[in-house]
Image (cartoon, grey):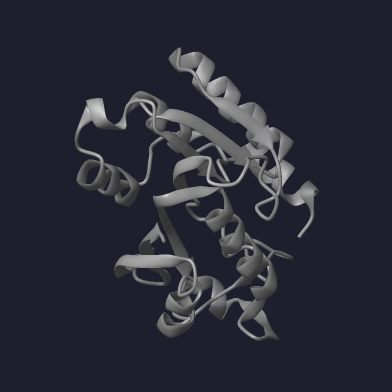
């Protein structure tokens, strides 16, 4: 997967509204506005910045990281338009620019599964490194039932090369046991759920595992 793909992607697609699962999670986990004010929250793989803006609106000390320069610019522009503070940087998922145990919450939404399984494991380890003990990570992963798996070429070990709309993108699809195992060492599992939505007369399936973990 090259930076050129993501630069082009973020030049043409800019989601504005936050994912309803993220909104629901924040409302349930951080309901007290005074308590969440000043907590350091990272939107990892920020993309359009839709969740960075959401975190800033909710009173978090909002940070954003993305591999794409275009995504970084989009996120900064979105924050500026909304008159909100935020800290935005360009970085890979495997080497985020924060010291150990710096963050209270990390939100890697729709991003950790891009790449092969070793890259995914390194990214999860990096999330664990930058989270404080007791800090939360809320994330999601593709399952083998997802539409992208059907249109992709298996590379072995759970990795796939997309041959459809996202031609050339490598991603990892995990079953439930493999997803749970990712967090077994450094995290406490708070809850684990499945998300399945069909679109276009049930021809397309978005099949995800949704995971909330707390750093040990």
Q: Quadrant of the C terminus?
A: bottom left
| Residue at x-position 79% and y-position 55% | 2
Q: Position of residue 44 (x, y in %)?
A: 55, 45
Q: Is residue 22 above or below residue 179?
A: above
Residue situated furthest top in the rendering? 83
Residue 60 is left or right of residue 42, and the answer is left
| Residue at x-position 56% and y-position 35% | 64
Front residue (pair 6, 106):
106
Determine the image quadrant of residue 33.
top left
Residue 57 is left or right of residue 168, and the answer is left
| Residue at x-position 61% and y-position 29% | 88
Front residue (pair 48, 178):
178
| Residue at x-position 51% and y-position 73% | 182
Is residue 197 visible to us here? Answer: no
Q: Position of residue 95 (x, y in %)?
A: 70, 50
Q: Is residue 16 above or below residue 209?
A: above
Is residue 5 visible to us here? Answer: yes
Residue 92 is left or right of residue 133, and the answer is right
Q: Position of residue 107 (x, y in %)?
A: 46, 48
Residue 166 is left or right of residue 138, and the answer is right
């Amino acid at each position: 997967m090259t930076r050129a793909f993501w630069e082009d992607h973020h030049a043409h697609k800019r989601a504005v509204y936050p994912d309803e699962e993220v909104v629901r999670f924040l409302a349930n986990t951080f309901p007290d506005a005074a308590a969440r004010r000043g907590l350091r929250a990272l939107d990892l793989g920020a993309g359009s910045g839709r969740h960075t803006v959401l975190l800033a609106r909710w009173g978090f000390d909002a940070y954003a990281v993305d591999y794409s320069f275009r995504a970084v610019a989009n996120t900064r522009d979105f924050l500026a338009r909304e008159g909100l503070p935020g800290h935005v940087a360009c970085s890979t998922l495997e080497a985020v620019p924060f010291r150990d145990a710096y963050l209270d919450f990390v939100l890697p939404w729709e991003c950790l599964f891009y790449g092969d399984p070793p890259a995914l494991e390194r990214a999860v380890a990096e999330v664990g490194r930058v989270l404080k003990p007791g800090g939360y990570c809320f994330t999601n992963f593709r399952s083998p039932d997802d539409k992208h798996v059907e249109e992709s070429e298996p590379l072995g070990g759970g990795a796939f090369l997309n041959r459809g709309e996202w031609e050339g993108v490598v991603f990892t699809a995990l079953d439930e046991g493999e997803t749970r195992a990712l967090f077994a060492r450094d995290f406490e599992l708070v809850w684990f759920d499945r998300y399945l939505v069909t679109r276009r007369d049930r021809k397309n399936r978005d099949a995800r595992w949704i995971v909330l973990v707390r750093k040990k």
